[in-house]
Image (tube, rainbow, N blue to C red):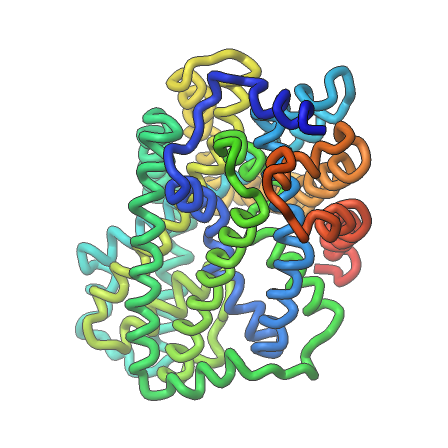
Amino acid sequence: MILNYYFCAHMSTNKVNFRSKIGLIAATVGSAVGLGNIWRFPGEVANGGGAAFLIVYIACVFLLGIPVMVSEFALGRGGKSDAVGVFRNLSPGKWWWMNGMLAIVASYMVLCFYMVVAGWTFEYLWQSVTGNLYAQDAGMALDSVADYKIRFADRMREYIQEDWKPLVNTYVMIGINLAVLMAGVQKGIERLSNILMPLLFVILLVFCAVAFSLPEAGAGLRYFFSPDFSKLTAKVVIDALGQAFFSLSLGMGILVTYSSYFPKDTKLTRTAITVSVLDLLVAVMMGMIIFPAVMSFGLEGEAMQGTTLVFVTLPEVFAHMPLTQLWSVMFFMLLLVAALTSTMSIAEVTIAFFQDRLRMSRIAACLAVLLPLFVFSSLCSLSLGTLDDVRIFGKTIFDFFDTFATNILLPIVAMTTCVYLGWFAPKGFMEDQITNGGTVKSWVLRPILFIIRWIAPVLIFVILISPLLFDI
């Protein structure tokens, strides 16, 4: 078993590693923390009985999220290659590499539409910095909640249905990603993550302090942390399962790719727990910010999820607060950080593939991955406006990429990865990886192996078929 470990660990001696443990954690947390933590989690809590959903969600993170994350870490560090190469290295001549190819296809489809959404966050940050986001409201009779809601909803709808402005912002985000990724893993991804992740948590802490000072902060926090188990239905449980799965970026090849940059002495279980807890902390802090805010300004009936939450409801909140522009700038900076760290990590999946499989240089691989986005992301953006009548299976290009990649491909990849590592990987591989070749004692080894073999595939299958179960 130990021979297997050392063979895998030294399979590619020229593979770059993260420079420090802090950088490793920052980059991996950045890959997990995304817009889903910010705009999906509060809505799930509101619909799922407050802390009742939170309790189930935490249970799902530990039951499903951490074990699957450990397995993807093991696959990446042990195979020491890209999402396809890890399977080729560990099981040469077998068809398992096709699962890695599915991960690359899924992640690239996600990147195409995610870059558009990242462009939206850049636009709102820019409008906040210049003051134009609220300037049009000056002198207008916007006294009621309904007035603000209509104004911000109209503004968002008009913006995304435009052709050129969303495209320009999407191109800006592609350019930023290109500049960072061309700098490499250590000088690009790791260095920027070391700056952006602390910044994200500082902004969250500032917003928590502000939220706690609002007049109805106590009522909002009580709503968030008080469980209403009468709302705990099978759908809510599966929603919590899906939130745990998607918020940790499982099945996308990101964790496999990033863990291929882990030093051989990295403790995989401890890293997975740290990343998962920090990702969970971001979601909880967002709840501690949003619920006091909406309670304090009478916005309980407003949309608490998705683009409406971040581009309509929260701008309403800021419009009612002193120092409106400051809070708006800080929030959309927070949103941009989450979007940027996510797009970087998603792009790295395909970049690593081009480097490892096609033997491209770093710069050539970055160009090959990101330049086509000027076409594919443009199509996703325009499908919300001029190309709205172009449909794939009844969906816009944007929605098709989202639905097919997120709801179908990602669960399939994660489920197949669990089956592979639980039953078909080289004998002793998972044990060698989790124990670092027998040098680290791990009391969670057996539970993780049991979950990967028997429980995780079933739970992920439930996530896969949940749209059919609840017709959503």
- How many numbered tags mark residues here? 0
Q: Residue at x 53, y 44 (%)?
A: 388
Relative to 305, is 429 on the left or the right?
right
Q: Residue at x 47, y 75 (%)?
A: 302
Can residue 465 be seen in this snapshot? Answer: no
Relative to 430, is 83 on the left or the right?
left
Q: Quadrant of the C terminus?
A: bottom right
Q: Residue at x 74, y 33 (%)?
A: 428
Image height of 128 relative to 370, above or below: below
Residue 43 horizontal/vertical position (percent): 54, 68
The foreground one among 376 and 220 is 220
Residue 78 horizontal/vertical position (percent): 61, 29
Image height of 109 relative to 370, above or below: below
Can residue 156 be seen in this snapshot? Answer: yes
State the residue lying farthest toward the top.
Answer: 359
Q: Quadrant of the N terminus?
A: top right
Residue 105 horizontal/vertical position (percent): 61, 31
Image height of 346 relative to 385, above or below: above
Relative to 38, is 467 on the left or the right?
right
Q: Residue at x 63, y 46 (%)?
A: 441
Residue 27 horizontal/vertical position (percent): 42, 42
The foreground one among 275 and 322 is 275
The foreground one among 252 and 271 is 271
**Image quarter for residue 143?**
bottom left
